[in-house]
Image (cartoon, rainbow, N blue to C red):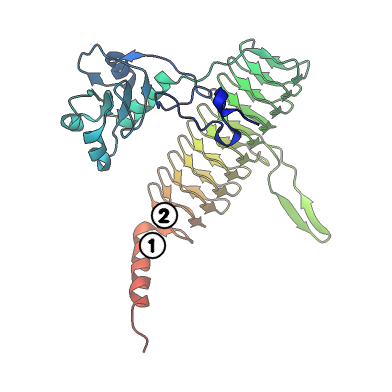
Amino acid sequence: MSNDKAGSLSPPHWGLKQMPDQSVGDERFYRRSGPFSAAQLAQAAGGTAAPSERMFSGVAPLGTAMAHQVSFLDNRRYAEALDATQAGAVIVHPDMAGRVPATATAILAVATYEGWARVMALFHPVTPERPGVHPLALVAPDAVIDPTAQVAAFATVGAGVRIGARSSVAGYAILGEGVVVGEDCRIGAHASLSHAVLGNRVFLFPGVRIGQEGFSFAHTKTGFLTIPQLGRVLIEDDVEVGANSCIDRGSIQDTVIGAGSRIDNLVQIGHNVRLGRYCVVVAQVGISGSTVLEDFVQVGGQAAFAGHLRIGKGARVGAQAGVIGDVAPGAILLGSPAQPRYEFFRQAALLKKLSRRPPH
């Protein structure tokens, strides 16, 4: 039995009590730094601000921000919220400076959203790791772990594994034999890695599977014959892979994820696939074996790719598209089978028009 009169919360309300200052970032989960001056915020945002002696202690949306908090406006559709905000400082594009209320300090940044991200990180820096190997971690004798790295309880680190400086391995993660993890990487809980080499600043979220055998077999008179998968997964610097995504190792060549790429949750990447630099792959996408995505390709959720394709640099593939052929650089595709967006819209308009015709 709970005793609300004694100040405790009854179980249905645990965690629902709002923080006193209504700041973004529950202090039970997010480390908080500050306060910061307008000049410090402007420096972090890559912008400018008028001189001010005010100090700011957190971030919040325009609609709920208070005088000691910072907010931002990146989309002009929400300009009315800017007019009514009580935020003490607002990050805006210089073109919007005249819309900032007199009660708020305008922080002018051309790259508004980027500035907002950097200010948020200023107030809420990544929680520092606790260097060392937990006594309950299972670590092979010949594994090499930098003294500044962290290996949590119940993690498994196999023979010949190398873990770089300031990297962390969460509980129940498994690093198979020979895996290499670079510097400043984060391996989430229950992730598993085999046959993989990671660069620096690679973040693998919980449940990620890296390096398992690809889906490859030969047809024989007596059934299927599994084809050995002898490649690796190479993940370059600054890559993030979302929760429960899978990246198969290569068969006779490596699967490669290019530097700076972002892979969402629940993505399947087949063997021998090669992603270029700064690709974006949204949730539930499936990429079949040996397909190549060149640099800066963007893929919407639930899109699917046949194998052995080449998707040109800067191409964009819409959600639920089915790609069965090569894609030219810079192309924008929609639909299944995928086609140029203008053709897709023309066909959709024609079908809509035909559907309105009265029956004969």
Helix, strand or loop for disc 1: helix
Q: Mark 2 Cα within 10 Å, few/some/many (few <14, many 20+)?
A: many
Callout 2 secondary element: strand
Using the image as rendered, state which of residue 158 and residue 60 is in the foreground: 60
Q: Residue furthest right?
A: 222
Q: Which residue is mark 1?
A: 344
Amino acid at circle 1: Phe
**Residue 264, relative to residue 65: is it above or below?**
below
Q: Horizontal placement of 340 versus 92: left or right? A: right
The number of callouts visible is 2
* In the displayed structure image, the side of residue 108 where residue 128 appears, left or right: right
Tell me where residue 94 sits by quadrant.
top left
Q: Please indicate whether residue 351 sits to the left or right of residue 98 in the image.
A: right
Q: Residue furthest bottom?
A: 360
Image point 48% across, 26% down: which residue? 26
Quadrant of the rendered structure where residue 15 is? top right
Give the quarter of the figure containing the C terminus: bottom left
Say which amino acid is labelled 2.
Leu
Q: Nearer the viewer, residue 354 or 71?
A: 71
- Mark 1, Cα crowd under 10 Å, few <14 / some 14-19 / many 20+, is some
Q: Position of residue 235 (x, y in %)?
A: 57, 31
The Cα–Cα distance between marks 1 and 2, rounded to whole angstroms, is: 8 Å
For the N terminus, the quadrant is top right
Q: Is residue 267 above or below residue 259?
A: below
Of residues 52 and 283, the one nearer the viewer is: 52
- The part of the image, by quadrant, that contains residue 150 is top right
Horizontal and vertical percent for residue 212? 70, 39
Are circles 1 and 2 on residues that touch, CB within 8 Å?
A: yes
Percent x, y for residue 64?
Answer: 34, 32
What residue is shown with label 2?
333
